[in-house]
Amino acid sequence: MRRLRGVRGPEMPEQSIEAALQAASLLLGYPERELVRQVPLLDGVADLLPESAAVPLRRICRHLKSTPLLKLQVDYTETFDLRRRCCLYLTYFSHGDTRQRGMALLRFSHAYRAAGVDFLGGELPDHLAVVCEFAATHDLTSGLRLLNEQRAGIELVRTALLDMGSAYVDVLDLVRAVLPEPAPRDLEKARELARSGPPEEEVGLEPFGPPELMGGRR
């Protein structure tokens, strides 16, 4: 079985990376009853993963099993729809609501088309769940490259989730477990974004604008 370099800890089999990213994609979606039904399957996926990925996956599965569905849905909305630093649209952190963001989004769309994927989802192509799904099921190499290019945003979201005590920090740790250690420049960029927010256009949009401006879940 092919093993990929650059992941945390020992080299991880390609199949394990795909399984981890597929699980993360499901877990980053709005929690419906179907997701709760799939928790035993997700728990089983943890058996395919090294400890760095298995531990956070098992932890979020325990949370899903022990929390009523309505509370899961309220928590999801309050976390990702209402908290600016938990935005799951990755290019927002590097480009804000500026004109340059359109070009950044095109990079994702072009990568999907190059892999033979017509992006027809209800989310923008830079949504973290979408990128994880693409990497897991279509083009792992290209998908991992897109995730690494947006590493500062991923680190910022993870820190925000940790600070608020959200169970979703385990999903971000699951994603991070299949990526290389963040470069110092990515950590510094994440700290700078936490201080000042993403770039702004002259129209005066507020930093970390609400997700409804981002074409999010309806």
Image (tube, helix red, strand yellow):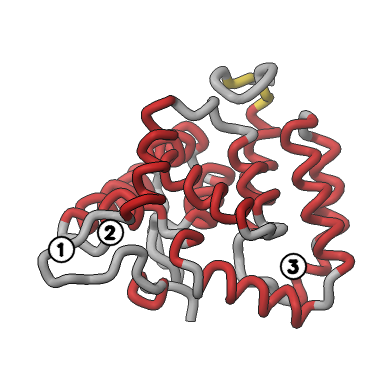
Between 78 and 217, the one lying in front of the other is 78
SS state under label 1: loop
* Residue type for callout 3: Leu
Give the residue at x 77% y 29%.
Answer: 50
In whole angstroms, how far apart are the C-alphas of marks 3 and 2? 31 Å
Q: Which mark sits nearer the N-terminus, 2 or 1? A: 2
- Up the image or down, 86 lies above or below 217; here it is above
- Residue holding disc 2: 96
On residue 201, the disc is: 1
* Residue type for callout 1: Glu
Give the residue at x 79% y 31%.
Answer: 51
x and y, in percent, of residue 86 in the image: 50, 60
Asked if the residue under mark 1 is in contact with the one under mark 2, i.e. CB atoms within 8 Å, the reply is yes
Give the residue at x 70% y 33%.
Answer: 16
Q: Horizontal placement of 33 versus 202: left or right?
A: right
Asked if the residue under mark 1 is in contact with the one under mark 3, i.e. CB atoms within 8 Å, the reply is no
- Up the image or down, 9 lies above or below 85; here it is above
Q: Which mark sits nearer the N-terminus, 3 or 1? A: 3
For discs 3 and 2, the disc positioned in front in the rendered view: 2
x and y, in percent, of residue 60 in the image: 77, 54
